């Protein structure tokens, strides 16, 4: 039996309500899709063990957070200790794309990461299975403007996915895992211990489940 320490990587998925954050997580972890998902209250998380770079076993702890503004105040507990942040938008909803900058800023403020300029973000445009007529006109141009201007002139990996059809979901999370692992190794090298942050967030999550309300 191996005695190797398991590496736990915390990933946060942010974005407006309805862009498909829950669907992406469920598709990646459980290989399933449903039209019946209810809006996330507060936050929820799932875990999945994967192999990164052919030989490194890691456990992804993926946090699916509420897109409603009234739950954003919970971000301090949920965001702390994150190793990667996924900014998700709906390719048929231009407002959700334009709001990515706000979600990024909110995360950096709430999470208090030690290296905001170097912290790993990834952008996912979901629902590419939609009819072309419903998609954002000149999407690539608008995405370039958002990435280069509103998000601080930094380039982040961008994936276009369909949680419904399971398109590019696996590929996106493989890159997410690699980026998260690099961040975790950097945290360890700098002596940052985020175990308390994990525990605090999980305890709040459990309390939310028991009360039925996160408000």
Image (cartoon, rainbow, N blue to C red):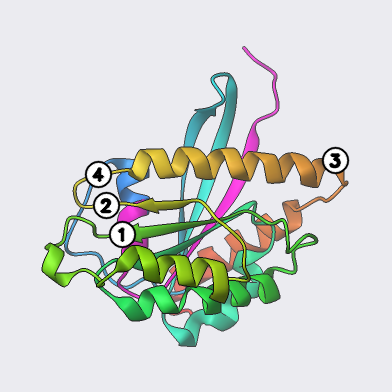
Q: Which mark is residue 166?
A: 4
Question: Gap in Å between the C-alphas at discs 1 and 2?
Answer: 7 Å
**Mark 4 burial class by Cα count in 10 Å: few <14, some 14-19, many 20+:** some
Under circle 3, the secondary element is helix
Q: Which mark is residue 163?
A: 2
Residue 142 rendering spot, x and y as whole percentages: 39, 71
Cβ–Cβ below 8 Å for labels 2 and 3? no
Cβ–Cβ below 8 Å for labels 3 and 1? no
| 35 w.r.t. 70: above or below | above
Residue visible at 37% across and 39% down in the picture: 170
**Mark 2 or mark 3: whose residue is earlier in sequence:** 2
Does residue 195 show up magenta in the picture? no
Under circle 1, the secondary element is strand
Closer-to-camera residue (74/187): 187
Quadrant of image for the N terminus: top right
**Mark 3 burial class by Cα count in 10 Å: few <14, some 14-19, many 20+:** few
One can see residue 215 in this view? no
**Left or right placement of residue 3 versus residue 71 in this view:** right
Residue visible at 20% across and 52% down in the picture: 164
For label 3, the residue is 189
One can see residue 112 in this view? yes
Does residue 21 show up magenta in the picture? yes
């Amino acid at each position: 039996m191996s005695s190797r320490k398991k590496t736990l990587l915390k990933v946060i998925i942010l974005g407006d309500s309805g862009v498909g954050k829950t669907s992406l997580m469920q598709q990646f972890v459980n290989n399933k899709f449903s039209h019946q998902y209810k809006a996330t209250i507060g936050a929820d998380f799932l875990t999945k063990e994967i192999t990164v770079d052919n030989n490194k076993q890691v456990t992804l702890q993926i946090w699916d957070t509420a897109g409603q503004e009234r739950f954003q105040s919970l971000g301090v507990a949920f965001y702390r200790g994150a190793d990667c942040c996924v900014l998700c938008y709906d390719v048929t909803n231009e407002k959700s794309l334009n709001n990515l900058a706000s979600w990024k800023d909110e995360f950096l403020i709430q999470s208090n990461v030690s290296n905001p300029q170097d912290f790993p973000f990834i952008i996912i445009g979901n629902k590419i299975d939609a009819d072309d007529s419903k998609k954002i006109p000149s999407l690539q141009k608008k995405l370039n403007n958002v990435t280069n201007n509103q998000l601080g002139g930094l380039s982040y990996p961008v994936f276009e996915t369909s949680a419904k059809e399971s398109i590019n979901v696996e590929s996106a999370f493989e890159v997410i895992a690699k980026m998260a692992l690099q961040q975790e190794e950097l945290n360890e090298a700098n002596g940052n211990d985020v175990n308390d942050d994990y525990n605090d967030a999980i305890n709040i999550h459990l309390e939310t489940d028991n009360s039925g309300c996160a408000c």
